[in-house]
Image (cartoon, helix red, strand yellow):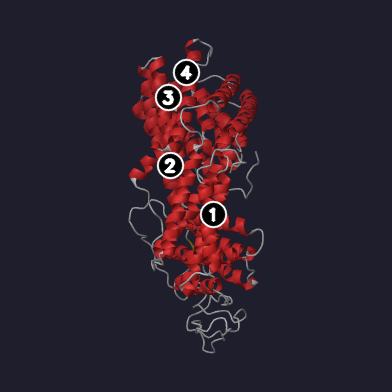
Amino acid sequence: MRAQRGPVPWAAVTRGALAAGPLLLAALLAGRASLGVVAAIAAMLAGINDRPGSRRTSIRRIGVPALAGAVGLLVGSYAGAHLGAFALTLVLTGLGLVGGGISAIGPVASGTGTQLLVTSAVGAGMPLPDPVWQTAPAFLAGAGWLLALRLLLPTPVSRTGDPRPGRGRGPYRPDSRFAPRPDKRSDPRPDPRPDPRPDPRPDPRPGPRPDVRLDFRFDGERAAVAEVYEAVAALLDAVGTEHAGARRAALTAALDHAQDALAGPRLRRHPSSAAERRLHAQYAAALPLGEAATALAWAERTVPKRAAEGPRRLAAAVRGNSLAGPLPAPARTDPALRALDAALLHAAEVFDRGRAPDLHTRRRSVAALVRTVLGAGGREYALRAGLCFGAAVATAQALHHGHWYGAHQHWYWLPATAVFLVKPDLGPLVSRVLCRAAGTVFGALLFAGFAAVLPRPEGLVVLVAVCGALVPVAARHFAAQTTVVTVLVLALVMVGGEPQASAGRIGETLLACAIVLIVGHLPVPGQRGGGVRARIDAADAAAHAYLVHVLGESDDRAARWTLRREAYRTLAEARAAIARAAAELPALARHSAGADEVAAVLERLVDTTTACAVHLDDTGRLTPRHTERLAALRDELATRRGRVGRSRTLA
C-alpha cells in the first residue's frame, strides 16, 4: 500500500502531455472523433508502459504490447460483431488463457498479455462507427506517436563531456594520495601498477575543456551503467556491516537494469557507434568489480574507505562521458582485495580505450519460452486470468442483454477492470482490489465534477492532456494511477459520444472487484504456488550451473560472468515473486510458505560460489572455510528443497 518515491520524471510528464491530448485534438479537427479516441487510448496504455530506461528498451516495452493491443482490438471487434453472447464469452475466455499464460514469461510479456485482453474487451464491448481496418491502424498510430516522442525528445539533462582524445581527463595514473605502501609479506608478487609518484614530464594532451555536446541517444544506458558503479561502491562501504546483504541485492538490481538497457533490440548484431561500444565495455568492466566486492562482503571483513572511491570516480566518469583519470589504489592484502585492485586497473584501461565485449547474457530460445508458458507457473497464471476474465465477460454480457445498463450500451469496463486486477505481478490481490476500488470511486466522482463545468469538447481535450501528463507520476501508486486513468478514459468516451457514466463505472468496478476476489481465491486443479516454484526451480538450476563451472576451474571468465549474472537475476526474480505471494491472504500465501528460506540458502550459495571463484583465481585452491561452507549450504538446500508450500514449522 506504500507509494514509491523519487524525483518527478519531467521527460515522461512532457511526453504524456504531448500524447493523448494532441492526438484527440487532431482527430476532432479532422472530424474523426472515434478514431481519435482509439488513438488516445493507445497512447494512454503506452504511457503506462513508458518506464525509466534506455530508448532502445522502450521499443520493446512499448511496441510489443501495442502490437498485441492491435491484435486484441481486431479479435474483439470481429467477435463482438459476429458472435452471440455464449460464443463470445468462450472466445474471450480462451483469449484470457492465452494472455495469462504468456504473462508468465516476464514484464514485457505481462504488459503484452494485459493489452491483448483489455483491447479485446474494448473492441467487443465498445462498438465504434469506424471499420476495424481503420481502428487497428489508429491504435498503432497512437502508441507509435508516444514511442516516437520517447525516441526523439531529449531528456532534461543530456549535456555530456566529449570522450574524444585530448578532451577528457587524461591517461590513467593511480592517485598518489591513496596509493598504499607495498606489503611484501602479504603479497610477494611484483605490483603491476605504474609508479604512483607524479610524472614530472608534462602531459602532451591538454586538460579538460569546458566544451560539451548534446548527446541524448544513450542517456538511459549511461545512467544505468553509472548506477552499477555506484552500487559497487555502496556494497564496499557496507562490507562487514548488517547492510551488506541489502547492498548486494541492490547491485544485482543495478546490473539487471544496465544489462536490459544495453541489450535492447537493434538492427545490427553489434553496437554500431563508438559511444555505444564504449558503454558496453564500461558495463563489462564493472562485472569483475562486482565479483570482487561480493567476495569481500562474503568474507565479512571491513575494507578501507578508499576502496569505494575508485568505483565512485568511475561512476562519475560514466555520467560525464569522460576518461577515468587518477584512481585510488586499494590495499592488496588478500585475494578479494587483489581482485578489486586488478578490476580497477582493467576498468581504467577500458575507460581510456574501450572495446565492445559481450554483454554476458543468455538469450532464451523459443522452446524455453514455450516451456515457461506451459509450465506450472504459466498454467496457474493462465487459469486464474482466464477464469476471472471469462467470468467478468459473462457477467457483463448478462447485464448487457438484460438491459441493466440503460442508456450506456458499452459493457467493456467490467472485463477490462478484471484484467488489471487479476495480474499477479502488480502486487497482492487484496491490495490491488482495494486500490482499484478507491481509485475508481474517487476518479469517477472527480470526473463528474469536471463534466458539469467544463465546456465540450475543448475542456475535455485539455483534461485528457493533463491526465496524460499525470500518468507517469501517478504510476507510483496503483490507486493514484487508477484515479488518473479513470478520469482520462471517462473523458475520452464522452468525447466519443457516450453520456456521463460515472455512477455506472463505480458499480461495474465494485462488481469486478468482487468477481476477482471470489474467483482468485477459489481452489483450482493442480498445485497452487506454481509461479513461485517455477522461479525457485530456475534459480536452483542457475546456481547449480554456476557452481559446477567454478569448481571445474575453467579459465573462461566470460562464461563464468554469464552464469553468475543468470544466477543472480533468477534469484532476484524468485525473491520478487516470493514477496508478492507472501503478502496475499492466507488462502493463497500458504501455497508458497517456506520459499523464502530456500531462496535465502540459494543466495548464500551463489555468494559463496563467487567468493570461491575469486579465491581460485588468486591461489588456485580453496580454503577449508570455502569447502565447509559449500558442503553445509548444499546439505541445507537438499533438506529444504521440496518443502515449499508446506507449513513453516516443517520448513
For marks 1 and 3, give the CA distance: 39 Å
For marks 1 and 2, give the CA distance: 22 Å
Quadrant for the N terminus in the image: top right
Residues packed near mark 4 inside 10 Å, few (<14), some (14 to 19) or many (20 plus): many
Which disc number belongs to residue 105? 2
Residue 510, horizontal then vertical, whole percent: 60, 23
Name which residue lies at 40% across and 30% down.
72
For marks 1 and 4, give the CA distance: 45 Å
The answer to whether residue 26 is visible is: no
Which residue carries the number 3 mark? 93
Which residue carries the number 4 mark? 394
Kindly identify the amino acid type of the residue bearing the numbered disc 1: Glu
For marks 4 and 2, give the CA distance: 28 Å
Residue 289, horizontal then vertical, whole percent: 52, 67
Which residue carries the number 1 mark? 603
Residues packed near mark 2 inside 10 Å, few (<14), some (14 to 19) or many (20 plus): some
Q: Label 1: state its secondary structure.
A: helix
Mark 1 and mark 4 lie on one chain; the one further toward the N terminus is 4
Kindly identify the amino acid type of the residue bearing the numbered disc 3: Thr
Mark 4 and mark 3 lie on one chain; the one further toward the N terminus is 3
| 4 and 3 marks in contact (CB < 8 Å) | no
Kindly identify the amino acid type of the residue bearing the numbered disc 2: Ile
For marks 3 and 2, give the CA distance: 20 Å
Q: Label 3: state its secondary structure.
A: helix
Is label 1 or label 4 in front? Answer: 1
Kindly identify the amino acid type of the residue bearing the numbered disc 4: Ala
| 1 and 2 marks in contact (CB < 8 Å) | no
The mark tally for this picture is: 4
Residue, far bottom: 200
Mark 1 and mark 2 lie on one chain; the one further toward the N terminus is 2
The answer to whether residue 629 is visible is: yes
Mark 3 and mark 2 lie on one chain; the one further toward the N terminus is 3
